[in-house]
Image (tube, rainbow, N blue to C red):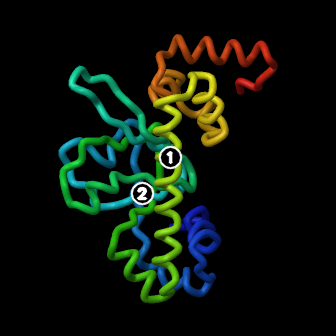
């Protein structure tokens, strides 16, 4: 199966050559997930990270009342996983499901080790990507703790420019930690300032 987005990612972001990609291609595992189906449910041990080749996933939690809090969206070229569950082999408290029919690349330690055998620099590049993910996570926490709904929304648009057309507004509100009504007010205020709503 052709995976052009993953090929571009691993060559440009992780420093592999075309020849090295050809060598690892037989070890690439793909998984298709239909809209509304799960890649991970609460109580399961997460054994992979998922690179999104095509489609959209969401990573979220449910509280005791069943209220959903979305931590991350993942569209093309994003990676999503419960890294704590993967690393510690503990049951996850999160869910990953598909907002659209989605094709993913399944990444695990065995795959990483095979790539490292071909290109030893890959592990360092992979660690750099992980540190970048952690940096984004800290920024998101800071926004949730101290930023206004307007600033949260503007940061969302900057990070996920394609999500405005691909996910329902209530999911965006959940990600921002505000009500759909608050999101509507923010969008109306920005529209009055000629900010593109899409």
- SS assignment at label 1: strand
Closest to the observer, 12 or 22: 12
Identify the residue at image location x=60%, y=87%. 19
Tags 2 and 1 in contact by the CB under 8 Å rule?
yes
Q: Is residue 44 left or right of residue 189?
A: left
Identify the residue at image location x=51%, y=53%. 135
Which class describes the residues within 10 Å of circle 2: few (<14), some (14-19), or many (20+)?
A: many
Identify the residue at image location x=49%, y=76%. 124
The numbered disc on residue 50 is 2
The numbered disc on residue 56 is none
In the image, residue 41 sits, relative to residue 1, either above or below, namely above
Q: How far apart are the two marked residues, 2 and 1, measured between alpha carbons?
A: 9 Å
Residue 115, percent from left and from top? 45, 81
Residue 154, percent from left and from top? 65, 31
Outermost residue to the right:
194
The disc, 2 or 1, on the residue closer to the chain's N-terminal end is: 2
Which residue carries the number 1 mark? 74
In the image, residue 111 sits, relative to residue 31, either above or below, namely below
Residue 5, percent from left and from top? 60, 62
């Amino acid at each position: 199966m052709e995976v052009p987005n993953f090929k571009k990612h691993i060559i440009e972001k992780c420093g592999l050559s075309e020849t090295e990609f050809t060598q690892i291609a037989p070890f690439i595992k793909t998984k298709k997930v239909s809209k509304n189906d799960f890649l991970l449910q609460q109580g399961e041990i997460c054994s992979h990270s998922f690179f999104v080749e095509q489609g959209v996933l969401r990573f979220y939690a449910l509280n005791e009342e069943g209220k959903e809090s979305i931590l991350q969206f993942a569209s093309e070229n994003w990676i999503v996983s419960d890294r704590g569950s993967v690393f510690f082999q503990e049951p996850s408290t999160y869910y990953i499901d598909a907002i659209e029919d989605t094709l993913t690349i399944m990444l695990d330690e065995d795959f990483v080790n095979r790539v490292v055998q071909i290109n030893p620099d890959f592990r360092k590049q992979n660690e750099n990507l992980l540190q970048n993910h952690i940096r984004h996570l800290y920024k998101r926490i800071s926004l949730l703790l101290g930023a206004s709904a307007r600033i949260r929304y503007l940061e969302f648009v900057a990070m996920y420019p394609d999500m405005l057309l691909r996910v329902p507004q209530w999911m965006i509100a959940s990600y921002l930690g505000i009500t759909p009504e608050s999101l509507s007010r923010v969008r109306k205020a920005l529209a009055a300032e000629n900010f593109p709503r899409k």
